[in-house]
Image (cartoon, rainbow, N blue to C red):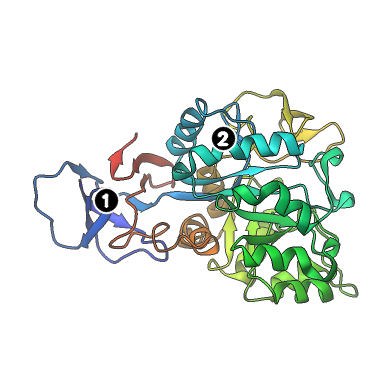
Amino acid sequence: MIIKNCRCFDGEKFLSGNRNILVKNGLITSIEEKYISGNEELLDADGKIVCPGFIDIHTHGIGGYDNSKISIEEYPLMAKKYNEAGTTKFYPSFPTISQKEMLHSLSIYKKIAKDIPGIHLEGPYINFDKRGAQNPVYIQKLNTEIFEMKFSGYLDIIKRITIAPELDENFAFTRYLVSKGIKVSFGHTTCNAEKANRFFDLTESIATHTFNAMPSIHHRSPSITTAALNREDVFCEIIPDLLHIHPEIIKLIFNIKGPERTIAVSDSMLATGLPKGKYEFSGLHVTVGETGARLESGNLAGSTITLAEGVKRIISTGVLPEHALMSATSTPARAMGIEKTDGYIKNGRSADLLILDSDYSVLKVILNGKMLI
């Protein structure tokens, strides 16, 4: 395939002039200013933006599918909904569910491991007092021996686990996960800044939905939230539905962390793309209405936006478009260690590409070098 006449965002910046991209065998093989000739399928981008496919490292579902309760037959249908919405790579994220459900779902993903970059366990190792929309019935203590006994067969697909660091005595659980090559995020936590910095010294961490289910900033009692913003080696997730955090806070995070350390995520649940109404999340009743997806308590229960919609909303706050795009492409790729294959328009990278309209809406999706929509 040759994609000609592109305004090319390469994952970090807009390239000068219009470009032509050659794709072969699912990979980007050339990006040229001059026209590339060949017998390949030709796609004229007509000067529109071409960017890497969006990478969602924190999402629970879409279009009626809960990705922690998926069957092998349902997975391709769910993946197609993500892909058509512009998310070409996603990490199925499990909330705090029963161990039986979790192990069953992991066994499903184990069978289709080649189709996913990995699993994110948002629960069950969280602080009860900051549980948010997580089911308190299934919260577990951080225990290395029990984890090893239950999950040792899935360490190749579990790529990220969110924990409350204050509950990790002597950081034994964190050290164990790091030794297994698993990314250790923090979230649903009450951790203070002192312990947070000791935790950050052990692992390049990711803040799970920054500011949500963690302490606010206090000028005399700094918390893990403050420490994360101060540390250059910590990535910060944001849910840019404009409900979880205010537009001014989105701009603040981008100003402090920069696009290199700010990650846009959808945190979408199964009602994404469906009408308002009653749904279920982590065994809890959720109502989707004008103010988002909420539990009976009023707590937000994930979002109902796609990552593509989130990028548009970030831009609407005044953040530079290239910074917003970076937060959904190269930054999540680097955070999860897949930057050598994904997140950039560079030679040798996956040909997962989006063509965007002038308002940054997704017009076309190219997956593995083939036109999807």
Label 1 crowd bin: few (<14), some (14–19), many (20+), radius 10 Å: some
The answer, for residue 49, to whether it is visible in the render is: yes
**Looking at the image, is mark 2 or mark 1 nearer the viewer?**
2
Q: Position of residue 258 (x, y in %)?
A: 57, 70
Label 2 crowd bin: few (<14), some (14–19), many (20+), radius 10 Å: some
Residue at the (44%, 38%) spot, across then down: 83
Q: In the image, what residue type sits under mark 1?
A: Gly
Residue at the (48%, 35%) spot, across then down: 79
Choose top left, top right, bottom left or bottom right for residue 225: bottom right
In this view of the protein, which residue sits in the foreground, 160 or 230? 160
User: Is the residue 112 above or below the residue 256 in the image?
Assistant: above
The answer, for residue 253, to whether it is visible in the render is: no
Residue at the (36%, 48%) spot, across then down: 352
Q: In the image, what residue type sits under mark 2?
A: Ile
Q: Is residue 221 left or right of residue 370?
A: right
Residue at the (73%, 35%) spot, across then down: 100
User: Is the residue 214 above or below the residue 273 in the image?
Assistant: below
Residue 83's label in the rendered image is none
Q: Position of residue 134 (x, y in %)?
A: 79, 42
Quarter in which the N terminus is drawn: top left
Q: Could you say whether the residue bearing mark 1 is in a helix, strand or loop?
A: loop
The residue wearing badge 1 is: 47
In this view of the protein, which residue sits in the foreground, 248 or 60? 60
Give the distance between the C-alpha atoms of the residues marked 2 and 1, in whole angstroms. 42 Å
Quarter in which the C terminus is drawn: top left
User: Is the residue 356 above or below the residue 230 in the image?
Assistant: above
The residue wearing badge 2 is: 108
Q: Position of residue 358 (x, y in %)?
A: 39, 47
Q: Could you say whether the residue bearing mark 2 is in a helix, strand or loop?
A: helix
